[in-house]
């Protein structure tokens, strides 16, 4: 994980359990040393729980896609 931009880019996949194992390991290493990304991860996770009432993994595909799009947009906004 070279920088925070890469890290933030992978967070929604990470939370969805879709991340490549190697990438996940690198991401977790980055999160340990980077408070800023950890905060973004925690707030994104809370957003997902709020959206889905903790039922993320029971959502139909289309809903998940839209949620991911919304999250990516949100993360990109934070980077400006
Ligand atoms: Zn970072």
Image: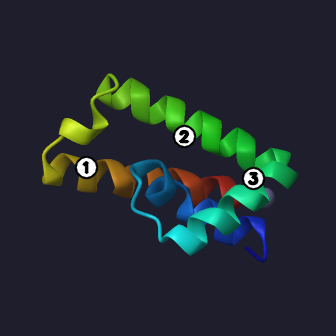
The residue at which mark 1 appears reads as 64
Q: Is residue 72 left or right of residue 23?
A: left
Q: CA distance from mark 1 to mark 3?
A: 24 Å
Please tell me whether mark 3 sits on a helix, a strand or a loop.
Answer: helix
66 above or below 1? Answer: above
Q: Which residue is mark 2?
A: 44
Q: Badge 3 is on which residue?
A: 31
Residue 30 is tagged as none
Residue 48 position by quadrant = top left
Colouring method of the image: rainbow
- Frontmost residue, 5 versus 18: 18
Task: Decide if ligand 1 comes within 8 Å of the CB at mark 3.
Answer: yes
Whether residue 73 is visible: no
Regarding ligand 1, which quadrant of the image does it lie in?
A: bottom right
Residue at image coords 47%, 48%:
15
Disc on the earlier residue, 2 or 1: 2
Q: Is mark 1 within 8 Å of ligand 1?
A: no
Q: Nearer the viewer, mark 2 or mark 3?
A: 3
Q: Secondary structure at mark 2?
A: helix
Q: How far is mark 2 from mark 3, CA to CA?
A: 14 Å
**x and y percentages locating residue 69 in the rendered image:** 36, 57
Q: Quadrant of residue 41?
A: top right
Across and down, in percent, residue 54 comes to 34, 26
Q: Earlier in the sequence, mark 2 or mark 3?
A: 3
Decide which of 43, 79 is in the foreground and name it: 43
């Amino acid at each position: 994980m070279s920088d925070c931009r890469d890290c933030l880019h992978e967070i929604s996949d990470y939370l969805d359990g879709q991340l490549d194992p190697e990438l996940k390991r690198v991401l977790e290493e980055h999160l340990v040393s980077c408070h800023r990304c950890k905060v973004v991860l925690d707030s994104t996770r809370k957003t997902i729980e709020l959206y889905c009432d903790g039922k993320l993994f029971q959502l139909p595909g289309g809903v998940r896609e839209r949620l991911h799009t919304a999250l990516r947009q949100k993360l990109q906004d934070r980077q400006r």
